[in-house]
Image (cartoon, coloured by chain):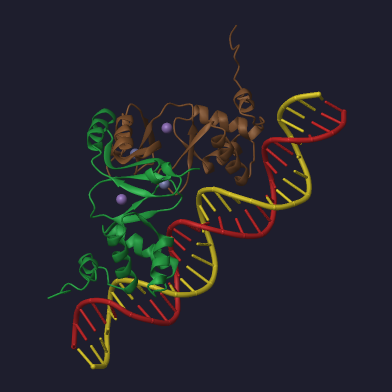
Chain colours: A brown, B green, C yellow, D red
Amino acid sequence: MVNVKIQHDCKDELNGVELRATPARIALMHLLETTDRPVDVQTMISFLEKKGIQADPATVFRIVNMFTEKGLTKQIQLQEGKSRYELAAQNDHHHLVCTKCGDIQDISDCNIEVLEKEISLKKKFRVTSHSLEFFGICNDCQKKTS
Amino acid sequence: MVNVKIQHDCKDELNGVELRATPARIALMHLLETTDRPVDVQTMISFLEKKGIQADPATVFRIVNMFTEKGLTKQIQLQEGKSRYELAAQNDHHHLVCTKCGDIQDISDCNIEVLEKEISLKKKFRVTSHSLEFFGICNDCQKKTS
DNA sequence: GTTTTACTTGCGAGTTTATTGCACTTATGG
DNA sequence: CCATAAGTGCAATAAACTCGCAAGTAAAAC
Ligand SMILES: [Mn+2]
Ligand SMILES: [Mn+2]
Ligand SMILES: [Zn+2]
Ligand SMILES: [Zn+2]
């Protein structure tokens, strides 16, 4: 009974939101499920290439837009002039971005919700989402002599 | 003694950071000083045109980069795929971005510093800056029947 | 006030990120 | 297996932004 669950192929996730399970989409879902940081389109293209799936940039842009539209992924922008994508299933969290090595870490348990409520009341602004990012130097980079 | 202080020409601010006071720079400093929301490059170009100063986009991009480098302005990105700029002299604050009309309001007094300290300790990440934006529907847009 | 010089700008070319139309291909349901 | 709707590749296009270089100008030196 070893290896009964060989490796799921994301077919269900994709068909579940009325998207066809194409090689590129399956591979990208795997990538997103196994990566601990938000992924940009260029990284996706390289990843697909390594897997033997050549995909046109236009296609990958269309895929991530679809994924986001269907609620599979969340699009985030970390002041880089490009978008990154991560699974929407993850609970609300934010990021630590190292301005030296580019490392991106998740942080949770920021009780921003408290702030949100204050804003709703004080400013009469109906908050639907927020983005909070911290920039600085990660632990590793602090150790490096530079 | 009316109108003794005609209208200051930002020459001091500019020369103070070793930048020459050119017409475009002076006009843009005025714009930034009198606008209550972060300004993007296209808006700057239109503004200059209205003032009779035609400026090449490359020049305006260079100007805002210089301003930011010299510490006159802060560059911010509100998930729009482009940068906006506001005076760095303003105290630390964040923004409410209406996803309907594009309105941008300032918010201050978010004690993010508390969070920053926690992160420094827990994650050993040296925070140098942060970005916090709330997206939603502004008061005016809530009233509109849509 | 004129000259000098370093700083600025305009222009053109080029890069990166992203979108769109259209013909061709493929996943999916029957 | 077939039909068809959905997806993809390719080419064109667009917006944001950068860079080199020649020409222009602000500021300082005379
Ligand atoms: Mn994340
Ligand atoms: Mn502001
Ligand atoms: Zn780092
Ligand atoms: Zn609004």
A33 or B105, which lies in front? B105
At 60% from the left and 45% from the top, the residue drawn is: A57
Side of C18 where A101 appears, left or right: left
Q: Quadrant of residue B55?
A: bottom left
Q: How many marks?
A: 0
What residue is drawn where x is 53% and y is 32%?
A: A71
Of the four image quadrants, the one with ligand 1 is: top left
Residue C29, horizontal then vertical, whole percent: 75, 25
Identify the image quadrant of residue A120.
Answer: top left
Between residues B120 and B94, which one lies in front from this camera angle? Answer: B94
**Quadrant of the frame with the C terminus of chain A:** top left
Residue B22 in percent (x, y) is at 31, 73
Quadrant for residue A53, please give it. Answer: top right
Does residue A11 appear left or right of residue B53 in this picture?
Answer: right
Q: Is residue B118 above or below residue B1?
A: above
Residue at the spot 67% in from the left edge and 32% down from the top edge:
A22
Tell me: B50 left or right of B22.
right
Q: Position of residue B114 (x, y in %)?
A: 22, 33
Horizontal relation, residue C11 to residue D26: left or right: right
Q: Position of residue A1 (x, y in %)?
A: 60, 6
